[in-house]
Amino acid sequence: MPDLIAPAPQAPALPPLRGEHVFDHWLLHCGQNPWSPLSPEAAKPYSFIWQSWLRFLAGHAAGDEQAWAHASAVQVLDFINHSPQSPKQAQPSDITRRRYWRVLDRVYDHALLQGWIRSNPAQGITAQDMPPSEDPKGAILLPRMWRALQRQLPAPDDLVSSRDRAVLVLLMELGLTPEEVRLLEIGHLRWSDGTPRVIEAIDVVGQRDRQSRSLPVSAHLHSALSAWLQARAGYHAMQGQSALFCTRKAPQLSNHTLLHLVTKTLQQAAQRHELPEPARMGPQVLRNTVLVQWLDAGCSVDEVLQRAGMKHPNALQHLRAYFGDDTTAAA
């Protein structure tokens, strides 16, 4: 991830972009990624999906070159449920639906960060309609890999490393979802009244039943957050911003930034400790691991659900291979 630097002077507002140009801009951005650049050749499947999406929209809004910018979640759902590669009258597989949705999500997320659209229609799909992960069992990190990840946490030496360390410790201790991390604000930190003041808890705010909750902060997490807050205070671009975490180009983390951070750190940990890379890498794997750790430590199912912001024990069924069947007893 590029180092955070002072933002460049604001460029003039860009004219409305055609859908083809949006994809080209996203591809150029991905090609400049120093960790895992995406080449035009490797991006051909992504280009096919995006061009198919534009043709799909053109069939509903002929002549509107800005149809991509006005697309709705309903259109996204209709598109991924009837992919052009599937035989007529055949429902595409969940893997195909997930692949198509992921491409739209990444390109629209990029457009959102550029200020070209107001919302990402791919994120408007309900949880019930969202294509499931390619691994329905869920995935967790093995204990050796988890310990290697703990040893790979970056030292808080500068702005970037301070932020990355705070985000990783937050994910590894509280098991938050990527969206919950992205939406955290400075005002969600609860400080003690005594001296010295310490962060005692974090308020997680959500719209689902039981999603809003207050989670205790350990001394380890407090230390990581404090180092980030000190670095953040010296970053001019974040002054007056409510979001707890930021990137160089935006006052809020993106899903792709979180995915990249976790994946990069896991890859580095595996290489350093001569371990095989996990089959699945990303914030959700960390969350799954934390949930299983809580159950292994003796927490009741209801307590785990409360900590994780979940309502029903069925929400843990994707992890049933890693623990007993007592989750069904709590239903």
Image (cartoon, rainbow, N blue to C red):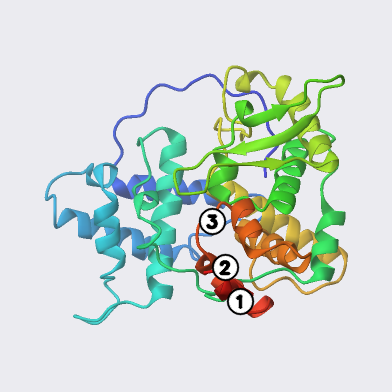
Give the residue at x 37% y 24%. 13
Decide if residue 39 is on the left or right side of residue 195: left
Proximity of marks 2 and 3: CB atoms separated by less than 8 Å: yes
Name above or below for residue 199 compared with residue 92: above
Quarter of the view holding residue 204: top right
Residue labelled with disc 1: 320
Give x and y (percent) for residue 79: 27, 63
Give the residue at x 74% y 51%. 173
Name above or below for residue 124 compared with residue 312: above
Name above or below for residue 129 compared with residue 254: below
Looking at marks 1 and 3 on the same chain, the residue that comes earlier in the sequence is marked by 3
Decide if residue 313 is on the left or right side of residue 234: left
For mark 2, give the secondary structure. Answer: helix
Q: Out of 170 and 25, give the one closest to the viewer.
A: 170
What is the number of the mark on residue 310?
3
Give x and y (percent) for residue 206: 49, 42
Looking at marks 2 and 3 on the same chain, the residue that comes earlier in the sequence is marked by 3
Type of the residue with mark 3: Met
Give the residue at x 25% y 42%. 70
- Can residue 133 be spotted in the picture? yes
What is the number of the mark on residue 316?
2
